[in-house]
Image: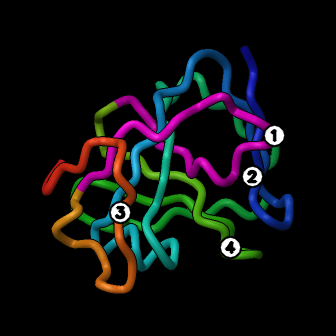
């Protein structure tokens, strides 16, 4: 199974080979600031991600343990990876076409914005 995706302007394109984890919605303050709302992401082993075009890819060290990949041309938030973990989270909204994925859970819900409610269904964890 191969899935493709890209940033808004196409300066970063990628392919994923194999199964993707069901997306997780993160409501932490960093994800909300990065995305403008909460951030929903799937996850794969780093070696399952192939960057076909990385002309606009830049990385921001968002903490001592993680970094976030984004397009430095259009501003799309694309990736999140923790150092030494061997996996990479990929913004679900950047995937092309129908994915067949279903949101599995919400994390860091105690940090969510006061301007929205979380729907019933997926588990809601106060922390990760």
Q: How is the image coloured?
A: rainbow
Ranked by sequence position, the earlier of labels 2 and 3 is: 2
Q: Magenta region: which residues?
A: 86-107
Instruction: Give percent across and percent down for residue 102.
Output: 53, 35
Residue 96 forms part of the magenta stretch:
yes
Name the mark nearer the viewer: 1 or 4. Answer: 1
Quarter of the image holding residue 112? bottom left
Quarter of the image holding residue 26? bottom left
Ranked by sequence position, the earlier of labels 3 and 1 is: 1
Instruction: Give percent across and percent down for residue 94.
Output: 69, 52
* Residue at mark 1: 97
Q: Which mark is residue 118?
A: 3
Residue 100 forms part of the magenta stretch:
yes
Identify the residue at image location x=67%, y=19%.
Answer: 17
How far apart are the two marked residues, 4 and 2, measured between alpha carbons?
10 Å
How far apart are the two marked residues, 2 and 3, measured between alpha carbons?
34 Å
Name the mark nearer the viewer: 3 or 4. Answer: 3
Total labels: the figure holds: 4
Q: Is 65 left or right of 88, judged from the image as shown?
A: left
How packed is label 2: few (under 14 Cα within 10 Å), some, or many (20 or more)? some
Please say if 24 is above or below 39.
above
* Residue at mark 4: 72
Contact flag, marks 3 and 1 (Cβ < 8 Å): no
Please say if 2 is above or below 89.
above
Q: Secondary structure at mark 4?
A: loop
Task: Quarter of the image for the N terminus: give it.
Answer: top right
How packed is label 4: few (under 14 Cα within 10 Å), some, or many (20 or more)? some
Identify the residue at image location x=75%, y=75%.
Answer: 74
* Residue at mark 2: 54
């Amino acid at each position: 199974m191969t899935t493709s995706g890209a940033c808004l302007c196409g300066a970063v394109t990628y392919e994923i080979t194999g199964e993707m984890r069901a997306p997780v919605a993160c409501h932490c303050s960093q994800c909300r600031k990065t995305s403008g709302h909460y951030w929903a992401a799937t996850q794969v082993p780093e070696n399952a991600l192939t960057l076909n075009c990385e002309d606009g890819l830049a990385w921001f060290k968002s903490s001592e343990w993680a970094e976030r990949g984004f397009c430095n041309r259009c501003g799309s938030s694309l990736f999140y990876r923790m150092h030494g973990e061997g996996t990479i989270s990929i913004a679900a909204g950047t995937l092309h076409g129908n994915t067949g994925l279903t949101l599995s859970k919400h994390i860091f819900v105690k940090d969510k914005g006061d301007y929205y409610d979380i729907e019933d269904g997926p588990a809601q964890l106060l922390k990760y």
